[in-house]
Amino acid sequence: MSLLERFDRVTTSPTLFLLVSSSVLLTAFVLVHTFIRRLPPNAPPTVSGNFPLAGSISFWTRRWDFYRHAMGRAPTGSFSFHAGPNAIVGLSGEKGRRLFFESRELGFAEGYAVLFGSSPQIKDPDSAGQREEMSNHFSRRLAHLLKNEQFRKKLPTLISDVQEGIEAIKNDPRGITNPFESIYRIVFRLTIRMVGADEIAEDPELSESTLKLFEMIDQSATAAAVMFPKFPSPAVIKRTYAGARLYMMVEKLVKQRAESGEKYDDALQYMLDQGDRTFKIIEFVVGALFAGLLNSGINAAWVMCYLATNPEWLNKAREEVGTTAAKYATNPNAPLRHQLDDVPLEAWESEFPIVDMCLRDSIRLNLLGTAFRKNISGREIPIGNGEVIPPNAFVTYATGDVHLNPDIYPEPEKWDPSRYLPEKAEDKKVVHGFVGWGVARHPCLGMRFAKLEQNIITAYFLASFDFHLVDKAGNKLTIPPKVDFNGHSAHKPKVPQLLKVTPREK
């Protein structure tokens, strides 16, 4: 049969013709897509397993393993890969770390906007494509809400919120609490109190609904949502739904305030008084929750697990709490948890160095995954050794490259607050040896509040309870759960962690 006869046979068979046409189109799409994604020859070498369309799947499934393998095989420690259509350069080592955190040509917001894939897409109907950059708006609003005067004014309310959370734990008849639920919710309430609305913080039902919507957005950060953001995948649909629900919730609060004429002293009222539209307020609140809750809430719970399995540091932390409380207590004979009521803001922020070290090493272990940037310079950025970051390429850096480096932190998978004692100072061995609070051009704007709420929660918990870690059967555990370093961010352990708590009388 001649080639022409074969062609006629295909074109006269609809099913066969459709099959052949689809195959041809798919092949052409893959070839064009691969050509468009091609990196310049002076970019770092591309990792193996960088598939057409999808890119490096293992970057999403086992990120730390992927990163270690890639930088271990790269001659300079730098490498390239793709996430869908997005070209990404991975950096490592001290030189790469300094470039990543110090370069003004690597955009912070631009990197996270695409690769984090978690923000709800809420459009401003009046913007006509001229929306103010979110990062600038976010920074200005957060800077005002976290001023010293705001802390001083909110401190009694924050302490009251913590006391209510502690009382709820105490009232559980089982004497058991999962800190990744109970402590996590206390942190959520404090965060909403500082960056959201009082109505949400004070209404348990509304607070729980808001938390569930936020977690729905958090869980939408899937590989498919990043690689194919316009495809209506379940993750994209859930994110859009949650964003819309949050929009309607805040809009309802705004209307209720307008109808009542009542003024509140909270973040929502401040943003309304500044003329912010509802979509801007939602962007800010969700961004603040991502910045605060995912790290502060998870690490506050991890600290309890670590202390519950380490008598030495539990005793040191409790002694610190007792010493500080006694220093300011108006009634030195009152139970410790009541003595803490007299501690002033300055002491909460500066007189808990042991608690701070406990939190610091928890952050080192649980700040997982990678940070993102984007080359916004419009030109190639030299990395060294003749390699460059191409224009518009994304850049990533794994925190484990420094935080889990045994040359910097011996026994890196072990929780050990003594690492930060002056005689050790392991985090000071290299430039940017600890990146848990951000470094260089992007320090954590919420660090002060995160430490404050951590100190308050930990102090009141230690003053209120004796506790230890147990399994489901109630058997005491002497080692904390192992961290899954392949996570994309701080996260709750897959196996629920339980603390057996006994109220303290003094």
Image (cartoon, rainbow, N blue to C red):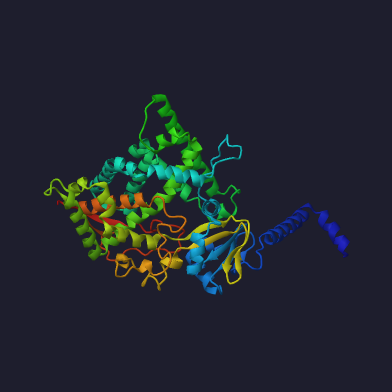
In percent of width and height, residue 221 lies at 50, 52
Q: Quadrant of the N terminus?
A: bottom right
Q: How many marks?
A: 0
Looking at the picture, how far across and down is residue 261, in whole percent?
39, 25
263 or 486, which is in the foreground?
A: 263
Q: Is residue 426 above or below residue 436?
A: below
Residue 24 or residue 485, whichever sits in front: 485
For residue 374, which quarter of the picture?
bottom right
Furthest residue in direction left, as rendered: 333
- Residue ID at (50%, 47%): 135
Residue 469: which quarter of the image? bottom left
Q: Position of residue 43 (x, y in %)?
A: 62, 66
| Residue 187 in view here | yes
Query: In the displayed structure, would residue 270 be above or below residue 429?
Result: above
Q: Is residue 62 visible?
A: no
Residue 229 against residue 310 in the figure, above or below: above
Relative to residue 152, is residue 248 drawn left or right? Answer: right
Front residue of this view, candidates 250 and 439: 439
Q: In front here: 191 or 5?
A: 191
Measured from the top left, where is residue 156 in percent x and y? Answer: 26, 41
